[in-house]
Amino acid sequence: MISSVKDILLYKLFQKAKLITGETALNNQVSGVMVMEAPDIETWGRKGLLILTSYYALEDVTEERIDLFFRHAKRLGIAGFIVKIDRLVEEIPDVFISSCTKYQIPLIQIDKATKYEKIITEILETKINRNAIVLQSYYNAHKQFIHLMMSQPEISQILLTLKNLIHKPVSLVENVKKHIIGTDPELNAYEILDKKYLPREQYMNLQYQQYQVKYNVHHPTKIYNQLSISIPNLGYEEFELIIHELDGTTNDLNFMSIENAVGALQIDLVKRYALQENSRSRLNEMASDLLHGRLHNQEDIEETISQLRLDSQTKYRVILFSFELPNQDTTFSSPLTTRFSDALINHSKREFPERFYVTRKQKVILIVPVYEWSLKETKKRTEEMVRRVSENKLYKDFKIHSSISNNVFLDHLAEAYRQAFDTQKILQLMGNQHAVASYEDIGIYQIFAETDNLDRLERFIPEMIWTLHKENPELLKTLHTFIDVNQNYSEAAEKLFVHPKTVRYRIDRLKETFQIDLQNPEETLRYSIGIRLLKLIPANTTKQTYLNGGSKNEK
């Protein structure tokens, strides 16, 4: 491992050295050594640097500037200072000693006979030799894992090989399904108490986290450390490799074996993903035939249901997820979109264990048995599933709409899919991001969806509503709110944050200008429906541009 300050003090060169600051921070790792020429440490300093100085560079610097110097040194992670007493500086100034003590930076005094050249040579020579050992270790581990992968091993064999190389138990955890494969099964049950990212060292190509854990059966009162490495994967699973540090920390040679093992695991996971995708594609096409009503022969329908392992005596719902990344070219699926689709599928297994799924570009379709679940319960499970997927930072920018059909028998599955699809159209027109709605929820909009009237909604919107939409949106909002609260002036005023007299004035103005009769229930219903339908038409669209097809161009 790269030497610490404590290790360097054991060098023969330092036999006569004096440790001024005691045992403080002697475990600081040393990555290099240099002679200090100027006090602008923020310009040339770096983490792990051991600085040689005679203090001459700081002799005429103010105490305030010296304190700033040491604050920068602490922030940068300077490993320590070695001060040589010579004819120019007979003793280390108190301000230097107190600053090293204050900022917990080791301070070592050497005599004038010790040459800087020898110190630099010995430290760098040790570092170069160690780097050569680390490089050879990486090569040996790489060769061993390449040989192993030629035999197409099981994941357990890859883990066992890593354990034998680093002499520590290891586990592979799949976090969505909560599935664990480990070399030591008794270590699979543990409680994570704390997590933190390890600073990246020069021998690390991956991001590592350190966990503090308690094992359920292995000294349950004692706290141990684990190393965690996320395994990049094409599929929906979220894998992490766990190194159980039961008997001490992981050294740089161990990291060489770990990083080779991660590469081997990635190769194996990609192979498994490819096989799964091949099977999924075949079943996708069969399920699509059912969903789109392409099978007209009862024998073909029954054969497809059998191969998909669905139950013809059970009712099902169709749950449709449609998603997109804003500003993304939708003519192709990006790797991130594919991963998002896979994440939805994986999380759906938890909420709907017996679901069957179909994937299409930027869509996931679930065929879910109803059993004893109410529509309310189905919506709750769908919302929970979307929430968990959206928690992943990778997917924070995705827009997703979720729709649920009525329950049907499998021979009416095409009808259920149409219901879910129509509900999606309403959700997307309304722009409700992350919305989950059932076919029942869209209510009166079913009429427009079922009769394919979504593209001709202007026929159902009264001329007065179009006029207000264009010329006086505030008055239109007042009318909408007034109708929604059953024409109660006080409630409308509260929702609009105005005085009830203002609402009364606006409504009277509407009645006078447009000769409307809000006491007529049929007329009031027309206005209410018209205002709601207006929400489904792109903003800033007039009736004429809508009739001319302008709204379609704006979508």
Image (spheres, rainbow, N blue to C red):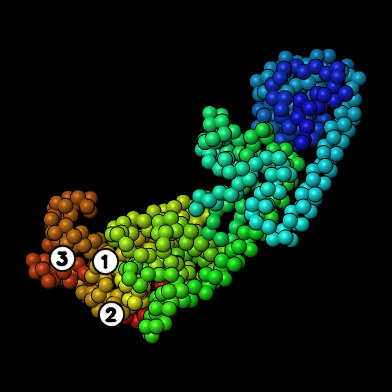
Specify the label residue 99 is tagged with.
none
Residue tagged 3: 510
Residue tagged 2: 451
Residue at the (66%, 49%) spot, across then down: 159
Q: Quadrant of the C terminus?
A: bottom left
**Is 454 on the left-hand or right-hand side of 184?**
left
Q: Three-letter amino acid code at disc 1? A: Glu
Dot placed on the residue nearer the N-terminal end, 3 or 1: 1
Residue at the (38%, 85%) spot, across then down: 296
Q: Position of residue 242 (x, y in %)?
A: 61, 44
Q: Secondary structure at mark 2?
A: loop
Q: Position of residue 199 (x, y in %)?
A: 65, 39
Q: Position of residue 374 (x, y in %)?
A: 28, 59
Q: Nearer the viewer, residue 356 or 491?
A: 356
Pointer 2: residues within 10 angstroms few (<14), some, or many (20+)?
few
Q: Eyeballing the image, is 493 above or below 300?
A: above
